[in-house]
Image: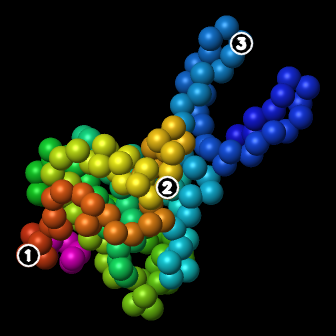
Amino acid sequence: MVLTTSGGLHRYRLHDRVRVTGFEHECPLLRFIGKENNVSDHFGEKVTERHVREALDAIGLDVAFALVACEGSAYTLFIETSADADQLLAAAEQLETALDENVHYRYCRHLGQLGPLRVFRVSHDGRSTWLRESARRGQRLGEIKPLVLSRHDGWARVFSGGYVHAKEMAATHLI
């Protein structure tokens, strides 16, 4: 998306992905989808906002909050949901499969640079906690976009909740 003046002068390249949801007279109504330039690349895996958003949308869980971030040497799904453990494990397996479609992610996993996807169940206030932490990290509140991929780590120390235990995830071979 590029903002222009009425004369066509290009002003800003926003790197925003939007969807036209309708029209108000001749003016399109836009819904923010994600940032096109939001790429997480710690080991060469090149995970994109778009890929993660599409994978999370395909999971179909009722989710109050979801964020994927690389914590140490593995990606973690931070999720606030009322889904039961079986649904959460199935969602994590589906997300790992989707991430593995990315040739760079798959190669990093094959080399052992990245471990398997982990799941951190956020117990409450995921979105507001994320907003506060994003502001603490230097973003202005009015400029924070609703992203599902973070290029930053340290979220496990920020959210309340905890990692799903290995024994709960043994059926899917995720830790």
Disc on the earlier residue, 3 or 2 = 3
Q: Secondary structure at mark 3?
A: loop
Residue 173 within the magenta-colored segment of the rendering: yes
Residue with the mark numbered 3: 26
The image position of residue 8, as x and y in percent, is 89, 30
Query: Disc 1 vs disc 3: Cβ atoms closer than 8 Å?
Result: no
Residue depicted at x 60% and y 22%: 29
- Give the residue type that dot 2 points to: Gly
On the picture, is 122 further left or further right than 138? left
First along the sequence among labels 2 and 1: 2
Q: Residue furthest top?
A: 25
Mark 3 surroundings: few (<14), some (14-19) or many (≥20) residues within 10 A:
few
Residue at 35% over, 48% down: 132
Report x, y in % for residue 170.
13, 76
Which x, y percent locates residue 162? 16, 64
Badge 2 is on which residue?
138
Q: Residue at x 47, y 84 (%)?
A: 108
Q: Which residue is mark 1?
A: 167
Tell me the residue at 75%/35% (across/down). 3
| Left or right for 121, reference 14 | left
Q: How many marks?
A: 3
The magenta-colored residue range is 169-175
Answer with the quarter of the image where residue 117 lies: bottom left
Report how far apart the C-alphas of labels 3 and 2 lie in the structure: 38 Å
- Residue 131: within the magenta? no
Whether residue 35 is visible to the viewer of this picture, yes or no, is: yes
